[in-house]
Amino acid sequence: MSSSSIGASGAVAPRASLLRAVTQNRSVRRFLRNVPALIGLVFLLVLVLAAVLEPWILPHPPNQQDLDNTFVAPFTQGAHLLGTDNLGRDVLSRIIAADRVALRAAATAVTVSMLIGIPLGFVAAMGGKWVDLIVMRLTDALQSLPPLMLAIALLGAIGPGLTNAMVVIGVVFSPAFLRIVRAAVMEILSETYIEASRSIGTPTLRLVLTRIAPNALPPVLVQASIVTGMALIAEASLSLLGLGVAPPQASWGLMISQGYNFLYQQSSLVIVPGVVLALAVLALNLVGDGLRDSIGRVSGDGNDR
């Protein structure tokens, strides 16, 4: 056998073994048997692909106006599959452009939430009684306010705009991650294998990285899918109120707001972006339910439960 064939087989073997390990994982198998979760995952993958391929798949520039073709009904013209709005802009193109905006906004909000909530969750769980008390009382105070009203108040202080809106939404939703991580870490700290590791002098940082963090990851993943859906709704709501995406940039919430003015003339201008937004949130919740049902915590020997 030539050295090149040996090298090729050696390169294929790790990939094959990795694929086999993934497909044989019990959590993955449970998720793949969950039909609603798979349907949600497929829909989310379609949204992600549409956002990534936007420059190449847009039928028309999303802000291009055609005043000779306003209020074209859906499925009546091949050039405008989902019709046009009051300015003759192609609705399908604007839906795809808004998809990219929505995913970027949701990713920003979830990242900010996790960067704030996860470390504070560990601090509350491992910092002692008084640290936990202070952190949780501040969390209770933050969660006592309606999220959307709090976001509007904060945006009034720092100014509107998509980036500001998503950072604010990330701050508002961070207590969700804080509580999930705190509860998971406190449960893990009571496990026998954690007490055994402490008794033999395992450094705290090593304990966190090798035992506590992997066990706390599953509920964080589930919470991330839920918060992503909430962030999509929040972005649409703030854009609808004029505090998020600014015209003429496309946003599902902004499209609903603008289409509402022509609801009786062409209801599809509200229905189409509303349905896409609802399906995106539903898909995220289906995936979250599937993750919750399929992912167990990692046991002390590294196996999933």
Image (cartoon, rainbow, N blue to C red):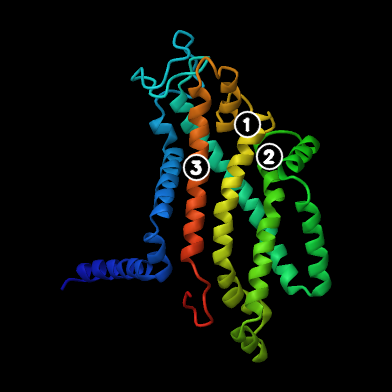
Callout 1: SS: loop
Callout 3: SS: helix
Structural distance between the alpha carbons of marks 1 and 2:
9 Å
The image shows residue 253 at horizontal and vertical percentages of 59, 32
- Of badges 2 and 3, nearer the viewer stands 3
Earlier residue among tags 1 and 2 = 2
Residue contact between numbered discs 1 and 2, judged by CB atoms under 8 Å: no
Please state which amino acid type lies under the numbered disc 1: Val
Is 253 situated left or right of 186 in this image? left
Please state which amino acid type lies under the numbered disc 3: Ala
Structural distance between the alpha carbons of marks 3 and 1:
18 Å
- Measuring 50% from the left and 15% from the top, which residue is drawn there? 65
Crowd tier of the residue under label 1, counting other residues whose Cα lies within 10 Å: few below 14, some 14–19, many 20 or above = many
Name the quadrant of the N terminus. Answer: bottom left
Which quadrant would residue 12 be assigned to in this image? bottom left
Residue 124's disc is: none
Which residue is nearer to you in this view: 141 or 121?
A: 141
Give the residue at mark 1: 245
Is 279 situated left or right of 182 in this image? left
Q: In the rendered view, would you say 119 is above or below 69?
A: below
Which residue is nearer to you in this view: 177 or 157?
A: 177
- Measuring 61% from the left and 86% from the top, which residue is drawn there? 192
Crowd tier of the residue under label 2, counting other residues whose Cα lies within 10 Å: few below 14, some 14–19, many 20 or above = many
Residue 165's disc is: 2
Q: In the rendered view, would you say 277 is above or below 143?
A: above
Earlier residue among tags 3 and 1 = 1
Give the residue at mark 3: 280
